Image: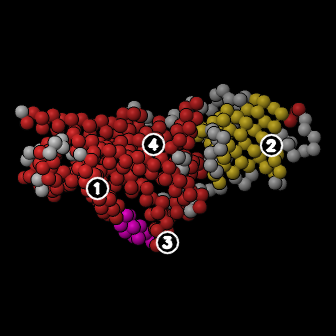
């Protein structure tokens, strides 16, 4: 039993690495070719950008590789009658399935490490040191604001005359929550203002807000009259577009920090649906390795498999994958826009895939009888 498991594991891993390499190179080459068509991008820019987008490619190729590897391995064993020989020696389809799913489990762990740690790290490095790539590849303009990492639950921004921190950006009503603004004059701290919320370059609407302001901090004497507390609404003169790099900072957080930030949004009463969907999508992509591997194993109990060519199987597989990606993207967008339950939007496609596997397996069992 141990020897058979070892043989299956070696064959599966070898096929998985080969298929993953081929798929990776196909996507990598397509991206390079499309970028070469741009007139404002140099080969060195393309090389750097491809390095930072490598994790994103692997997140697409690893689940598909699990599916194709299982499919090709089963087809190979059936064509060579090795699977029949294994069954005659007491090796059941359940043993085969458990062996492959364990290997797919390792692929699933690798996927969560990539999406939860490697990808955010590279995005963070890209945002900090290679900011010019965003202008060339995405044409996003950042005017005047310099962002730093999240520290003590807050994000910090700096402009020429002041810098400020806040706990969350509420895109629905265009406000920053739990804000501290530090005004600078002649390279000295002049004023500190704290508020429950601040509008971004918009006409303020009247609603409850507490503001505490401290003036003349740069003076030799500090008076009680310099401290004021009032209730009003006010805005700060920055553009909403200048906060677009906020999402880059958030996506640069590892999976634990990302979850902590989402909890902070919920605590501040900010709609966090978009980020919760992105968080659970990391888990969903990881679990898809197991589901795809199981889907590729359905041929273990197909007595007509010999009459079906591997080309036809791969063709059907790619159609299934495209349909899965389309359906998954559709559900994710609904979840980001709060039009669908977060868990249903991220795991709905997996549930549908599991339902397909169950239906196919039930039909196989009925045919056997």
Residue 157 at x, y percent in the picture: 66, 49
The disc placed on residue 271 is none
Of pointers 3 and 2, the one earlier in the residue sequence: 3
Secondary structure beneath disc 4? Answer: helix
* Magenta stretch contains residue 34: yes
The residues tagged by marks 2 and 4 sit, at their Cα atoms, a distance apart of 38 Å
Asked if residue 239 lies left or right of residue 315, the reply is right
**Relative image position of residue 161 (x, y in whole percent):** 74, 52
Q: Residue furthest top?
A: 208
Q: Residue 343, can we see it?
A: yes
- Sequence-wise, the earlier of marks 2 and 4 is 2
Q: Which residues are magenta?
A: 28-42
On screen, residue 27 above or below 254: below
Q: Which residue is mark 1?
A: 10
- Label drawn at residue 44: 3
Q: Which sits earlier in the primary sequence, circle 4 or circle 3?
A: 3
Q: Which mark is residue 191?
A: 2
């Amino acid at each position: 039993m141990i020897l058979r498991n070892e043989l299956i594991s070696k064959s599966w891993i070898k096929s998985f690495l080969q298929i993953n390499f081929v798929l990776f190179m196909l996507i990598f080459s397509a991206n390079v070719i499309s970028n070469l068509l741009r007139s404002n991008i140099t080969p060195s820019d393309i090389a750097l950008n491809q390095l930072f987008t490598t994790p994103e490619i692997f997140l697409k190729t690893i689940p598909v590789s699990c599916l194709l590897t299982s499919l090709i391995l089963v087809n190979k064993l059936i064509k060579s009658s090795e699977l029949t020989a294994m069954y005659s020696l007491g090796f059941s389809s359940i043993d085969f399935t458990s062996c492959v799913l364990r290997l797919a489990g390792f692929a699933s762990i690798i996927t969560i490490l990539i999406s939860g740690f490697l990808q955010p790290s590279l995005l963070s490095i890209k945002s900090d040191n290679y900011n010019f790539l965003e202008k060339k590849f995405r044409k996003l303009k950042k005017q005047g604001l310099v962002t730093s990492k999240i520290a003590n639950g807050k994000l910090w921004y700096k402009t020429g005359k002041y810098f400020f921190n806040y706990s969350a950006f509420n895109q629905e009503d265009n406000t920053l929550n739990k804000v501290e603004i530090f005004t600078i004059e002649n390279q000295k701290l002049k004023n500190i203002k704290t508020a429950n919320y601040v509008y971004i370059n918009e006409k303020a609407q009247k609603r409850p807000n507490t503001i505490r302001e401290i003036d003349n901090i740069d003076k030799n004497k500090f008076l009680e009259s310099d401290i004021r507390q009032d209730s009003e609404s006010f805005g700060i003169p920055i553009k909403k577009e200048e906060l677009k790099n906020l999402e880059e900072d958030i996506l640069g957080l590892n999976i634990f920090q990302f979850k902590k930030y989402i909890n902070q949004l919920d605590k501040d009463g900010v709609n966090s649906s978009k980020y919760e969907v992105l968080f659970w999508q990391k888990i969903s992509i990881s679990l898809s390795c197991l589901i795809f591997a199981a889907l590729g194993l359905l041929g273990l109990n197909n007595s007509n498999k010999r009459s079906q060519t591997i080309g036809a199987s791969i063709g059907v597989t790619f159609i299934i994958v495209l349909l899965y990606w389309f359906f998954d993207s559709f559900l994710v967008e609904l979840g980001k826009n709060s039009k669908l339950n977060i868990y249903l939007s991220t795991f709905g496609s997996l549930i549908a895939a599991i339902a397909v596997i169950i239906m196919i397996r039930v039909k196989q069992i009925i045919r056997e009888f």
